[in-house]
Structures are given as structure tokens and as C-alpha cells.
Amino acid sequence: MGQSPSTALDRENSLSDRFGFFSSSGFLSSDGFSDEFVANPDYTAGIPDECLAYVFQFLGPGDRNRCSLVCKRWLCVDGWSRHRLSLNAQSEIVSSLPSLFMRFDSVTKLTLRCSRKSISLNDDALVMISIRCRNLERLKLRGCREISDGGMLAFAQNSKNLKKLSCGSCMFGAKALNAVLDYCTKLEELSVKRLKGIHDGAEAIGPGAAASSLKTICLKELVNGQSFEPLVVGAKNLKALKIIHCLGDWDRVLQLIGNRNRYGKENFFVNNNESNGNSDPLMEIHLERLQVSDIGLSAISKFTKIENLHIVKSPDCSNYGLVCVAEHCKLLKKLHVDGWRANRIGDEGLAAVAKHCPNLEELVLIGVNATYLSLEAIASNCLKLERLALCGSGTIGNTEIACIAAKCMALKKLCIKGCPISDIAIEALGSGCPSLMKIKLRKCRGVSCEAGEWLREQRGSLVINMDASEADGALEASVRNGGIHEVGQETGGGDASTSSNGRLALLRSRFGVFASRNVVACTFRRWYNGDDSFNSNL
């Protein structure tokens, strides 16, 4: 595609100065275009640059790179309209940084990633980037081990508009983070993962000038996560707190946050004569693989606006802590509980959730021995429940699934993994859960492949994703001698209708003759779909 003489000439002359570094290598020289190519009309010449940039937004990085090679105008539009950039942050890229950021001068989101076997860019390169990217709002650093506290200090002084910082596997420490929190007054999100400079005896990390703007804090796999205590407690408008696999006792930190919230409510009530202000903005808490107990959960319950709570692999948490949260956090919408098979969270805690949290929309239970008592209460009271996952529980069987099928009218997605259910539960789902759109079955040995096919016929719009190993008896999903192996299947089709025990018994008796044969599941399904006489019996 060429350029029309009327508009392209001025653009090329203005761009030759801006992208002169390409002209020296002959990349954009006019000699590279044939006369026939230039003579052809440019049908995009009448399209404004803003519209062309809008089209570029729907393309992937590879397609945008190829579009930038079409002509100088497209090169320019791609440069000033590209706001997100990801670079391989090796030391060899330092010489190309000036020309690179001369072209992409509107970058707001930058990712610098370096592999373990390479040497990353250093402090000077990071300072150069901060000078040229004045509009930078989000920075992600991965494996940049050559960047020190001094480099981060200089970067923070030049990046006053930074709103999000995510760093992982880097060598700088508390001084660097304190500098960012002191100079980046608009910082809203901070994510720290495996930061090597945060060790025992490191200085405390405070909120600094970002105390009022910080909304999200995520701490992952830190040896001395306790050094972030002043930051977590001092963030006044914190909305999301995620602490994952960080050493230390976190009950104290959660208590300090809860006490701060309680005192804030009392002061707000005295000054405004009302108690429903913005004194507890925290809405999401994610605790995973931490030393936290019911004391910490009781402190969390003081935040009455929590909507999303994850309690994952924290064996010291029990029903008592979950009851405290349910009684006070009545706006809860998402609850994830991984009991790690400790059997400390069960029917008592889930019954409290069913009683006090009617707005629950998503529930994930992993390694929690729930029974009919709690699941029936949740299905009856949580009428907005749309997503449910039941994994690794030995007490969830056909009775529990039948209850869910009968009472969860709004349920759209259901996942069952490693539970002792059988074809009877699948039969119940055939006529229950009218809003169900997708069901996923994993490691449920009592569920046969023919039951999945039957459910497919019953629920035409339902997407079924199940393991091929869930066949009955000796029916298997692989032929070892023939080398054929099917990992899983996802099917959908058929018309919605009711079912009965007689139909399921007839279905199982029909396929029982093949119980001693080694049949591939996919071949089995093709034979089943082609047998009109058998289908007519249903």
C-alpha cells in the first residue's frame, strides 16, 4: 500500500527527523519503494489518524508490528497510539532505549522482564526510561536483578504519575519501596513477590505519601513480610489486601487493621452522628498459606463491607472464625475456602454463611467436609448463587447434588471434583438447575461416560466437561495397546426434558454388555449417536 502525493509527502518529511535513526540503516529510505508501489493510491489516506489508531487497538502485538512496516504514516500512528509495551530487559537493550522510546513516546504501561540466565538492565537504564516515559502509570519488573535501591529512588523521583508497581524476583529492598511510596503520591496498587532485598532485620515499609491513594496491596512469597505491617495498617483507603505464602504471624497485623477500622467508625459516628460512612473501605481479602487463626478472622469481621474473601490452606482457621465473618460481613458475594483437609471448617460455618449472607454469588469449597445440612441451607437462602465448586470432599454425594439441583435456580456454573457421586447425581442435574450453562466433572469415578452422554441429550445448551476416565466398570477411555488415549471431553447438545430412574436404569443396562470390553470413549459415543433404535427407546 503506497502513499498519495498530496498528504504523504508532508508526513514523510516531518517523520524523517523524528525517526532519523531508521534512515541511517536504510529501513525507511525512499529508495526501498518501487515506482509502481508509490504510484498506487493509498485508500487509507482519507482516514484520520485517530480512526486508524482506534483500529490498531484491536490488533495483537504481532499484527501491530507488521502494520508499522507498511508506510511511515502507519509507523507514526502505531508509535504514538501504543500505550502498552513489554520488553526483554537484558543488558543488550540499553543502547536501543533512546530510539525505542523516541518512537513509543506515549507509553503508560511498561513491562521489563529478564530471564534468570541473563543480565538485566541496570540503574542507568531505568533512570533513562523514567526520563523519557513521563506518562508512565504502570510498571512491572520481573527478574531485573541489577536494579538497586538507588536506581529505584531516582526512578521514583521522575515518575510522579505512577499508579501501579509490580515487582518480582528483584534484588532491591525496603529503601526502594519506601522511596516509591514517598514520591509516587498517586500510587494505587502495589504488588511484591519474592523480593530478595526484604530479609530479616530489614527496615519497616510505611505508606509514606501514598497512604491515602493506595487501594490494593498484594504480598507473595516473602521471607520477612512483617516489615510491611506499617504499610498495611497505614493505608487508609485500602480496598483489596492479598497476602499469599508470607512467613510470620499475621493475626497481629489483621488485629491492628481491625482496631483501626473500629476506632475510625467511632470517630466518624461522633463527628457525623451516623455510622454508615466510608470508614471501612476494605472489600476484598485473600489469605493463602499463612499463619493466621480465628483471631485474625474475628478481626476481619470488623470490615462489614467485605464482598470477596479467600481462606486458602490456613489450617488454624475453624468454624468459629467463619461464623464471626458471616455474622458481620453480610454483603459477602464471593467465598473461597480451602480447608486443606484439616476438617476444621464444615457445616457450622457454612450454615452461618447461608443464614447471614443472602447475596452470595460464588462459593468454592476445597477439602471441606460439607453435608446435606449446610448445602441445603445455602441452596435455600442464597438465591443469587451463580457459581459453585465442590472439590475433594468425601461427604458430598448424590443427596447433596440432588439438593443443589432442586433448589439452586440461579446456578450457572458447577464444578465437582473428587467427590463420591454417581450417575444418580447426573440424573438429578438433568432436570434441575434451569439456569445451568456449564458443568465440569473431574475425578468422579462413580460417574460413567454414558451418563454424560445422556445429560448431553437432556440439556442441549449445557456445556459438559468431564474426564474420560470416569467410565463405569472396566470401560476405559484409553486403549493402552493401541496407543490411543483421550484426556477429556467437552460436549453439548440435545433437547431439555425431564428424566426418571427407569430411564437411567435402562440406559445403564443397555451399555452393561460392554463392561468387560476395552472400548475407546470417542468410538463408543459415535456408535451411540448412530443407533436410532436405541434412541427411540428413550
Image: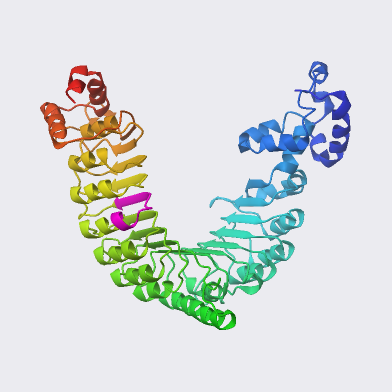
Quadrant of the image containing the N terminus: top right
Q: Residue 418: where, in percent of width, then height?
A: 25, 48
Seen in the picture, residue 228 relative to 398 is either above or below; the reply is: below
For this rendering, which residue is in front, 431 or 31?
431
For residue 343, say whether it is visible: no
Left or right? Give the position of 279 relative to 490: right
**Which residue is at 32% across, 36% downward?**
464
Q: Residue 473: where, in percent of width, then height?
A: 14, 36
**Which residue is at 36% across, 55% downward?**
363
Residue furthest front in the image: 273
Residue 383 counted in the magenta span: yes
Q: Quadrant of residue 142?
A: bottom right
Seen in the picture, residue 535 relative to 282 is either above or below; the reply is: above
Left or right? Give the position of 322 relative to 135: left
**Which residue is at 80% across, 16% downward?**
36
Residue 453 counted in the magenta span: no
Q: Quadrant of residue 234?
A: bottom right
Q: Residue 307: where, in percent of width, then height?
A: 45, 61
For residue 444, say whether it is visible: yes
Region of the chain picked out in magenta, as a range: 379-390
Q: Residue 337: where, in percent of width, then height?
A: 34, 60
Quadrant of the image containing the C terminus: top left
Q: Quadrant of residue 474?
A: top left
Seen in the picture, residue 362 relative to 198 is either above or below; the reply is: above
